[in-house]
């Protein structure tokens, strides 16, 4: 393995599978009326999901920190918060905050995104960012494809709105509204993002 950023990709795949599984299981619990202790099961699922995301957050920092140092690991996390269309890196913090303090995922993501942008702005130096793989890629995005950053941020917010609606529906019995338009918008933006990224040199 040439670079530990591959580990982050593996993290992303596992976390995506876990989120999808979480939604599917909650849906099954929701439609079946003969399940005992349904609320306890759902709360246990949420606790497990939160614990997994905290563990992945610590693991990601451990892996990147051991290779690049804590400063670069922190910057990598900040960059990933604004260049990936699926908000898995932000969820490593926003999901535990939602569980522990009932802070809305979208509100958390707003602060995480603003914090990440400020951190990048303060630490940004082309030569310094070229010392690690994701930093090099970010430099290229700034020079050639800033649209990808914008699409990523918009996509992340829409994805979190969808997930927040799912959580509110299954845990607070709040009716889902505008779900289909949001999902279609999310798929369209991610598809455009993937197409531009595929052609990006």
Image (cartoon, rainbow, N blue to C red):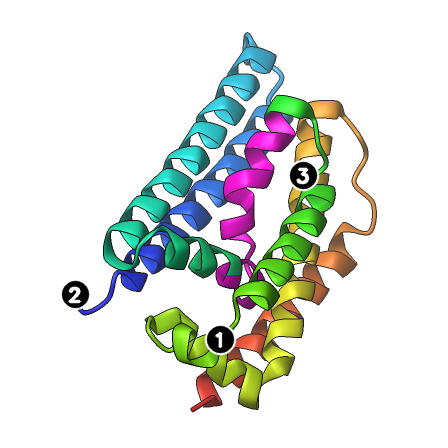
> Residue 106: x and y, percent?
72, 46
* Dot placed on the residue nearer the N-terminal end, 2 or 1: 2
Which residue is drawn at the image coordinates 24% and 57% (left, top)?
67
Q: Which residue corresponds to mark 3?
A: 166
Of circles 3 and 1, the one toward us is 1
Is the residue 106 above or below the residue 189 in the image?
Answer: above
Task: Say which element carries label 3.
Answer: helix
Is the residue 57 above or below the residue 77 in the image?
Answer: above
Callouts 3 and 1 close, C-beta under 8 Å: no
Depth check: 149 or 192 in front?
149
Callouts 2 and 1 close, C-beta under 8 Å: no
Checking the image for residue 161, the label placed there is none
Q: Which residue corresponds to mark 2?
A: 1
Q: Can residue 34 be seen in this view?
A: no
> Residue 3: x and y, percent?
24, 66
- Residue at the left extreme? 1
Q: Which residue corresponds to mark 1?
A: 125
Of circles 2 and 3, the one toward us is 2
Label 1 crowd (10 A; few <14 / some 14-19 / many >=20): few
């Amino acid at each position: 393995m040439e670079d530990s950023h591959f580990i982050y990709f593996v993290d992303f795949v596992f976390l995506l599978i876990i989120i999808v599984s979480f939604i599917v299981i909650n849906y099954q619990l929701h439609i079946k009326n003969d399940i005992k202790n349904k609320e306890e099961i759902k709360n246990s699922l949420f606790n497990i999901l939160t614990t997994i995301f905290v563990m992945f957050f610590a693991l990601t920092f451990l892996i990147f920190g051991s290779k690049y140092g804590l400063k670069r690991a922190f910057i990598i996390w900040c960059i990933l918060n604004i260049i990936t269309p699926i908000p898995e890196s932000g969820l490593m913090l926003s999901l535990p905050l939602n569980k522990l303090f009932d802070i809305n995922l979208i509100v958390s993501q707003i602060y995480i995104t603003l914090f990440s942008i400020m951190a990048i702005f303060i630490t940004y130096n082309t030569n310094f960012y070229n010392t690690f793989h994701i930093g090099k890629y970010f430099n290229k995005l700034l020079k050639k494809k800033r649209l990808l950053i914008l699409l990523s941020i918009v996509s992340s917010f829409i994805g979190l709105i969808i997930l927040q609606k799912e959580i509110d529906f299954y845990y607070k019995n709040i009716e889902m509204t505008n779900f289909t338009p949001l999902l279609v918008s999310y798929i369209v933006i991610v598809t455009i993002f993937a197409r531009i990224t595929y052609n990006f040199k």
